[in-house]
Image (tube, rainbow, N blue to C red):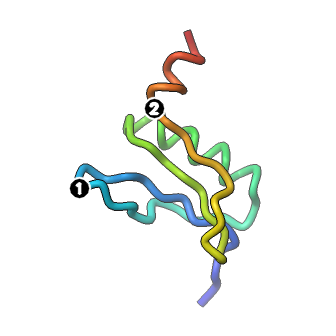
Amino acid sequence: MHKFKFQIEELNPFQEWHLHDSADNQEYAIRRAEKICKQIHRPVRILTLQNKLVAQFDPEKLHSESQ
């Protein structure tokens, strides 16, 4: 089974991180995570296979930046 380099996770209503998507390309993972965050209005983060944080998106910050 192919292991993707980046895991895109959302913070669910129970305050647990849940895998939402995966990617091999960091730029794609960042664009995808930002889009997911805007769509579901929940925090989204990107981790490497070694569980290192690449980026985290907060829906409140994304909303205020777009205004």
Q: Earlier in the sequence, mark 1 or mark 2?
A: 1
Q: Residue 61 at what x, y percent from top left?
A: 52, 26
What's the distance in space between the residues labelled 1 and 2, CA to CA? 17 Å
- Amino acid at the residue labelled 1: Phe
Residue at 63 percent of width and 82 percent of height: 3
Quadrant where the image shows the N terminus: bottom right
Residue placed under numbered mark 1 in the picture: 14
Q: Secondary structure at mark 1?
A: loop
Q: Residue 49 at what x, y percent from top left?
A: 65, 76
Residue 64 tag number: none
Residue at 58 percent of width and 16 percent of height: 66
> Callout 2: 10 Å neighbours few (<14), some, many (20+)?
some
Judging depth in this view, the residue of 1 and 64 nearest the camera is 64
Q: Are marks 1 and 2 in contact (CB under 8 Å)?
A: no
Judging depth in this view, the residue of 31 and 15 nearest the camera is 15
Q: Quadrant of residue 15?
A: bottom left
Above or below residue 23? Residue 32 is: above
Give the farthest residue toward the top.
67
Q: Residue 48 at what x, y percent from top left?
A: 66, 68
Quadrant where the image shows the C terminus: top right
Residue at 60 percent of width and 57 percent of height: 46
- Amino acid at the residue labelled 2: Pro
Residue placed under numbered mark 2 in the picture: 59
